[in-house]
Image: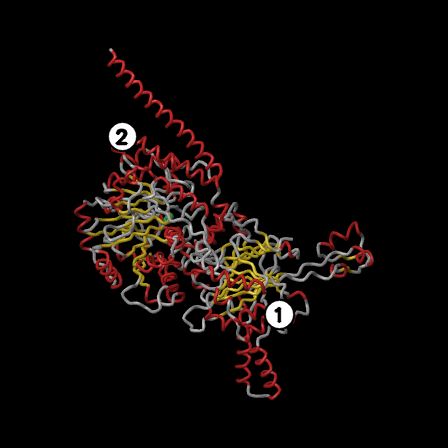
Amino acid sequence: MKYLIKAVTTNNRDLKTALLFTIEERSYLFNCPDGFQRVALSNKVKFKGVRYVFLSGIQADYYGGFPGFYLSSRESSSGTIADLQAFKIGVIGPAKIKEFITQGRCFYGGLNFIEIFQYGKLDRFYTEQFQNGQFTPKISKHDPNNLQTEKSKKAKAQQQQLQSNQEEEKKSYEIQQELEESQEECHEFQDNYLKVIPIKVYSSDHTELESYSFICVPKQNRGKFLPKKAIELGADPKFHFKILNEGNTVTLADGSIIYPYQCTDNPLPSQSFIFVFIPNKNYLESFLSPENKQLFEQFYFENIDQKCNQIHLIYHSVAFEVLMNKDYRDFMRQFGLNVKHVVDCEEVNDEVQMKVKGYQLSSRHALVCPTLIPLSKMAIQRHQEEAKTQLAEFHQVYNLLISQVGQVFNLYPINSSNVVDNSQVIQLKDLYTEEDESLNTEMQQLIKSLLKLKKNEDPNMDLEQYTQLDNSIDDTEPSILFLGTSSMKPTTYRGASAIYVFIKGSGILMDSAEGSYGQLYDHFQKKEIVDEHILKLRVIFITHIHGDHQLGVLKIMAERDKLFNMAEPGNELYVVTPQPMWDYMTDYINSALRYPTMVKLVKISDLNPEPQLYYDNESPQYNPKQPHIKEGSQLFKRKYSKTSVILCPVRSYEEVNQMIENHQPNHQVSQEMLRMLNEKMNITHMNAIEVNHCVESFACLFGSPDFGRIFYSGDTLPCQTVINYGQNVKLLIHEATFDDALEADAKSKKHTTVGQAIEIARKCKPWRTVLTHFSPRYQKIGEIDKRHQEHRIMVAFDHLRFKLSYLEWAYKFLPIYSNFFTNESTDSEAQYDKSRDFMLQKQKEINDINIQQIQKTQNSTTANAENKKQ
Ligand SMILES: [Zn+2]
Ligand SMILES: [Zn+2]
């Protein structure tokens, strides 16, 4: 039997803890922080079969990765219709979880496969019984003798007293209510495998949201089967042993019944465990409240009479200050010396969680032209030596272990030497193998010789001069950083859509997929720099509702919120939001942020300079509460069977300028944002240009007399509005999801192919074009061919960062990139071999050419010499 706990991710600066408990084939996930799936994937931490997800809160550090997790689980389960029908994920969270997920249904793609439960609502918990695949909801009540709070005991006693005294009914009713309420707070979750008792804790100054920790009691293991006992009771080894061994009853010929427990050993004790999530010391008082202490007491070592409640492991995803607190240590001590304590503190862990594959690829990309991908060295040091020393002292008293991503704790069979399994942990030596190093060195040399070769062939191609330019972010001109360039979802190699534009010390983020914050962290490495850029971020423009463009906004808003000690009017973040996400965003801002006034939502359609919608003229009636438009319904007919489609007119450049100039947003907050953009960044207009993708899809356009216009298409089919408003822009960033062979796919998914994007660039005549949003099938590099050179088009990579003027020459490096990176194999080792083969071959070619050149010069010298002789 499998019975284990796995650290899917740990508590770091950029990402928080996610834990998995697996019993037999079923798994339970505890928290889904923003970006956790990608980190797990790239560290080869696998998990599947998750049936329930427990959330400590609705903050991005707990919930931020849930939508992405749900969507990818659903996608991977849907092999057949039957698979999809069997698929279900239950999410259990604090108050508001239901509204919150329901409001996000526009990007959840309906809520048919999610069950939502709320802590403290007894009636929302189910005990599952699989009978013909049916769910039987059953109210799960705790054992009143076992898990009774002080409050409910008191209430009960009072009630009994009242009843005996025949007091007035009203008071009795009130107390009855109180009793029920107190029972509600003392809820627990239970299915056939696991009982979870959530512990709610508050921050003492009430500035932060509640957080939940969990006591988990898995089902008891059946005792060992005793054949002798079974024979004594009349069982026939041939027919009955198997049945009894599987835990079923046997009826003998004489009608007597043998129960399995009659012929088994004492059941094995259940290996209980506690997951503690305490963000800071302000929560301690509440965590160690008398009420909670009473709950913990049943599990304290000295109180354990039945072994079934014994706690074997406590996982501390807490702040270091909590771990060092005396009261908290007392709490730890009570569970006895045999408990395994796993410590997962941000202060002790590595600063950043490694996205190994992505980093390896980016650092290799960076070899071609370090000016364009200025990657910092991976922060591999555990920080805070002091914390480590303190921990070492601490370690002598407790059975301590520092958590690592991929670490597995076996709870069964009980065998202390077998408790921790580190085989899935990727060590630093795995990340930087000598082989990698030598490959990088080889590659670096080869790139150098390639650059020289190009210069020899064509003196205009002196690329080496660009490889070491100053690419600092300064006020002289805008800098653009691609945080993610994948479409659909983040992959091991690429993040999903997010582009940070730095202008005059402030920032605009165009789209913000899940993990954008982590990518920003990977890029700059230092917390101070990341904090600075998060604080200076003033606008997030969400082009449309798809998860690969917006799921990371919550995390960015939350991190920004953490940087304030008080609301600072004048430093608000404006989030340009499509209508279907409006309520969801409003709710998050008001319930999960400490300073909700520091985020202002701007209606995306308010920035549209056109008088009407062309591709989606039904969207004003779009109703987020009506997720499925049924085929044959009136709405379906109106939406999809339009007979007359109003085509967007072809507009001249002058007309476009007029439209932009005359456009006045209706809402005050939009006007306010435009004023701020003007003051801070000298941006004279920001517009949302309707594109042809999903409901409320827009491109982002803004301009300044300092640098001209920047246009980012978001996701779209090739469309006239882009051709209109993209005219003569300085920089056109266009999606190019598929290569030309997949045009039909592109059309059905409403995306653009590389060829189409190049055609749009040809029509718009921007100064430069960058293509991005590549399908996950192009893991290493977007499709590149001769056309890019012809049209001076650059291809985006994760961590590509450039000053606008660098686009003058950046595209010239593309042939070098495409020499070294191909998408043929997704298997990295094979890929490395391939790139080595390629390099060796290239080396040979270069040598051959060099030899030829040498021979040529030799020949000519000899010829000259001979001529002279003659
Ligand atoms: Zn997309
Ligand atoms: Zn999309």
* 10 Å crowding of disc 1: few (<14), some (14-19), many (20+): many
Q: Would residue 195 appear left or right of 718 to someone viewing this image?
A: right
| Helix, strand or loop under label 1 | loop
Q: Would residue 312 appear left or right of 789 to someone viewing this image?
A: right
Marks 2 and 1: which is nearer the front?
Answer: 2
Q: Which residue is mark 2?
A: 458
Query: Which residue is painted at 38% across and 49% down in the image?
Result: 376
In the foreground, 394 or 665: 394
| Helix, strand or loop under label 2 | loop
Quadrant of the rendered image containing residue 557: bottom left
Q: Would residue 363 appear left or right of 43 to someone viewing this image?
A: left
* Residue sticking out furthest to the front: 869
* Residue 42 visible in this rendered orientation of the protein: yes
Q: How is the image coloured?
A: secondary structure
In the foreground, 148 or 102: 148
Q: Amino acid at mark 1?
A: Tyr
Residue 282 at x, y percent in the picture: 45, 71
Residue 103 at x, y percent in the picture: 41, 61
* Residue 137 visible in this rendered orientation of the protein: no
Of the two numbered discs 2 and 1 on the same chain, state the one appearing first in sequence.
1
CA–CA distance between discs 2 and 1?
78 Å
Is ligand 1 within 8 Å of the beta carbon of the residue shown at mark 2?
A: no
Q: Which residue is mark 1?
A: 300
Residue 495 at x, y percent in the picture: 40, 48
Q: For residue 355, which numbered disc appears in the image?
A: none
Q: Amino acid at mark 2?
A: Asp
Residue 755 at x, y percent in the picture: 32, 37
* 10 Å crowding of disc 2: few (<14), some (14-19), many (20+): few
Report the quarter where the C terminus lies: top left
Dots 2 and 1: beta carbons under 8 Å?
no
Q: Would residue 645 appear left or right of 525 to someone viewing this image?
A: left
Q: How many circles with numbers are drawn on the protein?
A: 2
